[in-house]
Image: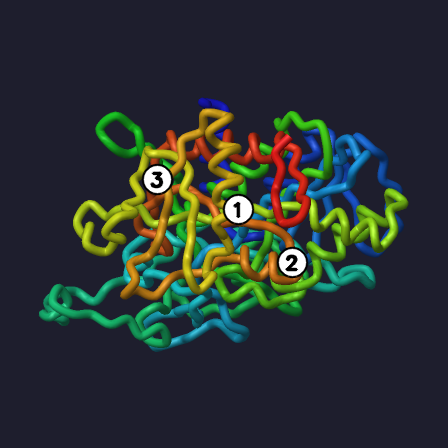
Amino acid sequence: MHEQLLRLQNTLTNGLTPYHVNELTKTQLLQNGYIALFEEDDWALEEGGKYFVERDGSLIAFALDNLDNLSFKIAAAHTDACALKLKGNFLVSTPEYTKVNVEPYGGGVWYSFFDRPLKIAGRVIYEKDGSVIAQTVQSPYCVQIPSVAIHFNREVNERFAVNPQIDLLPLLSLQHTDEQAVFQSLGVSERVLAHDLFLVSAESAFDSGMQSELLSSPRVDNLTSVQAVLEALLSHQTQAGVCVGAFFNHEEVGNHSAQGAGGDFLENTLRRIAYSLRFNEIEFFKAMANSFLLSVDNAHAVHPNHPEKSDITNKTEMGKGIVIKSHAKQSYATTGVTSAVLKSIFEKANVPYQTFYNRSDAKSGATLGNICMSRFGIHGADIGLAQLAMHSALECFAKADYTALIDGVSAFYSTPLSQKENVVFLR
């Protein structure tokens, strides 16, 4: 567990943006014998092989195990987190300061970004030797969004509404500067043509709680899931099927992009796997009928100061195991059948679990699960670990739940599944 937590802390601290997460993920995959593929190339896949492919900030990895009966066991998580995205022409100059013009990315708890060390991170794109190159960058310095002193805002502790166009502009410098100087400070000397840059929390993951039983960090939602799926994929033991780890960008803004869960990246990858292994279209459809998708994204723990925010009979607790998430309007894709399948898998593997439902008078969040599953018509469910302060610049969770999440996804990968007449069999 110690090594797993160290790897997680590294991902939480250094996975500043989806582009940084991809680099960290690729490093671990390559160290474990995975081979890089490219969408524009032909694929020559072999049984027993391990591969990954990228698309513009998203990544899909897969291991080809015994393929006598083709099926896919997919665990999907998202690599993005709520942040502030730099606009084009992002410098705002006043007589006193230079600030950065940003817009919200996702539904963040924006007051939590005030008075906190923040970095500029993401990617910049430039032309060099006839090629357009995207370079992952981060600032070596921090910036801050300063609060208005209470002496100027006496009602701040009674009410405070954040105006993102006015209140969320970070202070960059006391000097007037230009964008090229900013890019040079990020380590890029070429003329930048475009960028996907964000303002992100620069704090490192740290132990919290009297017994150090908690881990506090930026980007707990959802890099805990990304790293847990990766750990399970790299260590699973299975006898049949294709085990897939899908890591998507753009979940926090709705999934609807070419590289998001609402695009065709996963579908195309699964089809190319089947066709490269000489399975035909009908065999692909049959494989999908025997496949299962886990949407791995975090859930809300009972809040220590506001327990009334939780459902009256489904109080999800930190430290009590994997959360199986359900919702009548299908914000989560879990059904009675898929919940039962997961409970059976977890119980056989001695993995603790609990259930999450929103209060019936509260609006539910959503995940990439139902979007992915509606494209394929396959079985699936939403799971995650319980956390506090979701979408804040600093979140927290129980270390024991992270271990349970790895064990649960590993058990899922290692369990052959099949379907006959709408009954799912665990062999």
Q: Residue at 65% x, 60% y: name it.
A: 259
Amino acid found under the numbered disc labelled 3: Phe
The numbered mark at residue 338 is 1
Instruction: Write down the quadrant of residue 220 in the picture.
Output: top left
| Distance between the alpha carbons at the discs numbered 2 and 3 | 33 Å
In the image, residue 417 sits, relative to residue 102, either above or below, namely above
Q: What is the total number of numbered labels drawn onto the structure image?
A: 3
Image check: 254 left or right of 192?
left
Give the number of the disc on residue 49.
none
| Mark 3 nearby-residue class (10 Å; few <14, some 14–19, many ≥20) | many
Q: Nearer the viewer, mark 2 or mark 3?
A: 2
The secondary element bearing badge 3 is classed as strand
Q: Are marks 3 and 1 in contact (CB under 8 Å)?
A: no
Identify the residue position indicated by label 2 in the image.
377
> Where does residue 58 sit, x and y in percent of width and height?
64, 53
Give the residue furthest to the front: 421
Q: Secondary structure at mark 1?
A: helix
* Residue located beneath label 3 in the image: 397
Instruction: Residue 53 in the image: state x and y as whole percent.
Output: 73, 48
Q: Is label 2 in a helix, a strand or a loop?
A: loop
Mark 3 or mark 1: whose residue is earlier in sequence: 1
Real-space Cα separation, disc 3 to disc 1, in angstroms? 25 Å
Q: Residues within 10 Å of mark 2 (few under 14, many from 20)?
A: some
Q: Percent position (x, y) of residue 385?
A: 41, 41
Q: Quadrant of the C terminus?
A: top right
Of 201 and 236, which appears nearest the observer? 236
In the rendered image, which quarter is residue 92 located in? bottom left
Quick one: which residue is furthest to the top in this view? 2
Q: Camera-side residue: 10 or 308?
A: 308
